[in-house]
Image (cartoon, grey):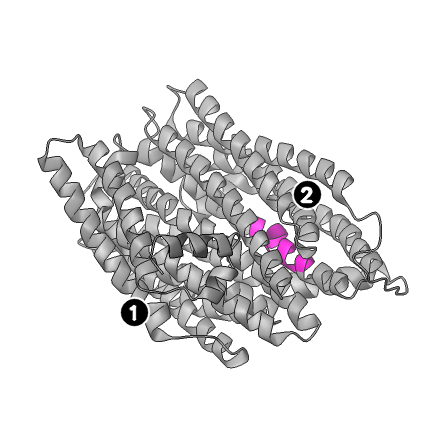
């Protein structure tokens, strides 16, 4: 049992560290290019609008692949059927090569129509064309990542993602710098072209990783032989698993496209009598879309860290259930939910307490959006919990539940967007409120289904009251310490960095002091026993 715990948590830790590096690099380059003269919130608007369409096609071609391949491979590996696992991988490569290249061509050819007619942002056509090649390479990369994830080897995912983000960050900064002086839409297209180059390099690394790390001998002590399954049958099985998993991502991506459409149209209506000139209204709508995108950059950081649990839960839960070990599956799900809450609560609290200082720290040349960040921080809590629950449900075989939950939430969001954004006093906040309603609904519905299908070790005190209390005290401390440091004549940006650093330490002490973790919880962490002994010596437990 101890070996199983460590295998799961090592997988989580591997993805956690890689996602931390990926998002730090991602945040770094977005901060740098946003502060470039001529880019700013307007450049972010073009950059993000193109990405919404790209994300939709990516959801169709690749988002469900890693979890689907991971689930199928994990089930075969858990009974020693290595031969079938390899065959699943090879068929998946051929299948998603066809899908990926088709969608890449479609995006490149249709970029002008999408930009002019669908999202009402003509300048975004350049960003769409720049992103088109990456769909093929992301699709193929996702198959390789899913294959190794199914063997609970997360290094393929973690290493390739860090490498991809490194090249993406470096090339984006370089290309945008070289395009300085060009219109914002051209600078944004250059930034997105860097993404395409980075995905090609990441794919090349994964091919290298596969050749060095593929199974050359039977897996463990099990050798299980099956007859060759026809490729068409395997392809159908892959699609039957990947499509339901992808549906939730596709719906989310469609929701973001609808978000862009309703935001642009709604803001045009909201400012009709405030900004009479149509071109000026369009520019302001693009700018506010960029502000919303900038806020998403920050809230996506904790979500990226949390995805470690959602990703690792699919093969871990499916593998445990495949051998009838429901107790292990339950413990993994419960523990992952606890960690999610302990990550996302303080992030949300910190964003709310220091919204304006954080934006001024990171985006001195374009620091608006504090109110949006506060609303998005509340949304962050429900999104992160739902994210972990989706991974659990997919591992349990309830693949349609996330899609249904998100779909219902998206309908509510669309209605709220249409009703709220055109109101001048609400304008862009309507999109933020709609997102909050969407994620709350999806989270509530998914948690309800999960609780009916697996026994959760859930305590309101442990999972809600204590983390919320620790977050509240930390947030108050963060706000007060930032204000005090400024009154002591510290530079505002230095005061913010010191306040955040001290608040992290305060939160850690509070979590330990409130005994949120049991001794068994510590044992599930990598190096958990050493951490527990160190805390005992410090008399914190």
Q: Position of residue 448 (x, y in %)?
A: 45, 77
Q: Name the residue beneath numbered marker 2.
A: 101
Q: Secondary structure at mark 2?
A: helix
Q: Quadrant of the N terminus?
A: bottom right
Report x, y in % for residue 217: 84, 51
- In the image, residue 122 above or below residue 526: above
Q: Magenta span has 343?
A: no
Towards the viewer: 218 or 520: 520
Residue ID for mark 1: 465
Instruction: Name which quarter of the figure residue 181 lies in.
Output: top left
Residue plotted at (35% across, 74% down): 460
Seen from this angle, which residue lies furthest right? 227
Name the image quarter holding the C terminus: bottom left
**Bounds of the magenta segment:** 57-70
Dot 2 crowding, Cα within 10 Å, few <14, some 14–19, many 20+: some
Membership of 58 in magenta stretch: yes
């Amino acid at each position: 049992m101890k070996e199983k715990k460590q295998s799961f948590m090592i997988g989580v830790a591997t993805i956690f560290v890689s996602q931390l590096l990926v998002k730090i690099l991602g945040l770094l380059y977005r901060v740098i290019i946003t502060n470039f003269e001529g880019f700013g919130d307007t450049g972010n608007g073009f950059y993000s609008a193109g990405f919404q369409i790209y994300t939709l096609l990516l959801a169709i071609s690749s988002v469900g692949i890693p979890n689907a391949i991971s689930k199928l491979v994990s089930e075969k590996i858990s009974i020693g059927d290595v031969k079938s696992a390899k065959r699943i991988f090879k068929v998946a490569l051929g299948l998603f090569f066809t899908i990926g290249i088709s969608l890449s061509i479609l995006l490149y050819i249709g970029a002008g129509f999408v930009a002019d007619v669908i999202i009402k942002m003509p300048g975004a056509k350049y960003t769409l064309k720049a992103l088109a090649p990456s769909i093929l390479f992301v699709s193929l990369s996702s198959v390789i990542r899913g294959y190794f994830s199914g063997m609970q080897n997360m290094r393929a995912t973690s290493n390739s993602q860090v490498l991809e983000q490194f090249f993406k960050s470096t090339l984006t900064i370089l290309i945008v710098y070289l395009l300085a002086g060009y219109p914002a839409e051209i600078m944004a297209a250059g930034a997105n072209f860097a993404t395409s180059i980075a995905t090609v390099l990441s794919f090349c690394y994964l091919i290298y990783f596969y050749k060095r790390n593929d199974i050359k001998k039977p897996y463990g002590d099990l050798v299980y032989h099956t007859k060759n399954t026809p490729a068409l049958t395997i392809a159908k099985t892959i699609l039957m698993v990947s499509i339901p998993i992808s549906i939730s991502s596709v719906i989310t991506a469609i929701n973001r496209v609808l978000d862009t459409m309703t935001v642009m149209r709604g803001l045009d209506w909201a400012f009709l009598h405030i900004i009479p000139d149509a071109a000026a209204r369009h520019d302001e709508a693009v700018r506010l879309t960029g502000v919303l995108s900038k806020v998403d950059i920050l809230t996506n950081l904790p979500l990226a860290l949390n995805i470690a649990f959602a990703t690792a839960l699919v093969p871990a839960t499916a593998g445990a259930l495949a051998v009838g070990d429901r107790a292990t599956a339950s413990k993994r799900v419960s523990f992952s939910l606890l960690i999610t809450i302990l990550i996302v609560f303080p992030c949300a609290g910190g964003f709310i307490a220091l919204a304006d200082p954080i934006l001024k720290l990171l985006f001195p040349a374009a620091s608006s959006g504090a109110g949006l960040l506060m609303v998005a921080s509340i949304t962050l809590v429900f999104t992160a919990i739902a994210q972990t629950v989706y991974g659990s449900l997919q591992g349990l075989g309830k693949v349609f539940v996330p899609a249904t939950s998100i779909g219902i939430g998206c309908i509510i969001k669309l209605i709220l967007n249409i009703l709220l954004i055109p109101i001048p006093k609400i304008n862009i906040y309507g999109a933020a409120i709609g997102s909050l309603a969407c994620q709350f609904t999806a989270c509530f519905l998914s948690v309800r289904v999960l609780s009916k299908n697996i026994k959760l070790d859930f305590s309101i005190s442990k999972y809600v009251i204590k983390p919320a209390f620790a977050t509240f005290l930390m947030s108050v401390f963060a706000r007060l310490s930032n204000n005090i440091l400024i009154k002591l004549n510290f530079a505002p940006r230095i005061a913010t960095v010191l306040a955040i650093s001290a608040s992290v330490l305060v939160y850690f002490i509070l979590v330990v002091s409130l005994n949120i973790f049991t001794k068994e919880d510590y044992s599930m962490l990598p190096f958990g026993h050493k951490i527990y002994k160190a805390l005992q010596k410090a008399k914190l437990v």
